[in-house]
Image (cartoon, helix red, strand yellow):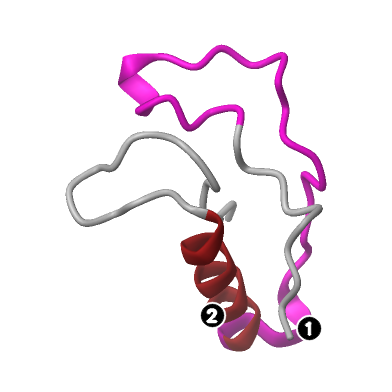
Amino acid sequence: MESGWPSQGGANGLAVPSAANQKIAIRNIVKAMGSDVILFSAYDETWKEDTAATKNTERHWGIKDLTLS
């Protein structure tokens, strides 16, 4: 399965994209999955189209600047 958290974009109810929330989400995914997780999309994918349907988050899933410690 694919999972993650965007670092920017519009909120979806209580789900708020931000660098701080991305760090929390990724840390918890790694904690829950252990060695069964593969982290990918190091960089934001600016070629993707942000739309209202995706709350303008589609470009902002890169984890390059994420420090889990």
Residue density around tag 2, few if under 14, some if 14–19, many if 20 or more, within 10 Å: few
Dot 2 corresponds to which residue? 28
Instruction: Point out the image quarter for the N terminus.
Output: bottom right
Residue drawn at 32 percent across, 19 percent down: 53
Q: Magenta stretch containing residue 53, yes or no?
A: yes
Residue drawn at 73 percent across, 77 percent down: 36
* Three-letter code, disc 1: Ser
Residue drawn at 55 percent across, 48 percent down: 7
Q: Is residue 1 left or right of residue 12?
A: right
Instruction: Point out the image quarter for the C terminus.
Output: bottom right
* Three-letter code, disc 2: Asn
Q: Secondary structure at mark 2?
A: helix
Q: Count the labels in the image.
A: 2
Residue 46 in the image, given as x and y percentages of width and height: 70, 20
Residues in magenta?
32-59
Q: Secondary structure at mark 1?
A: helix
Dot 1 corresponds to which residue? 35
Distance between mark 1 and mark 2 Cα atoms = 13 Å
Query: Between tags 1 and 2, which lies in front?
Result: 2
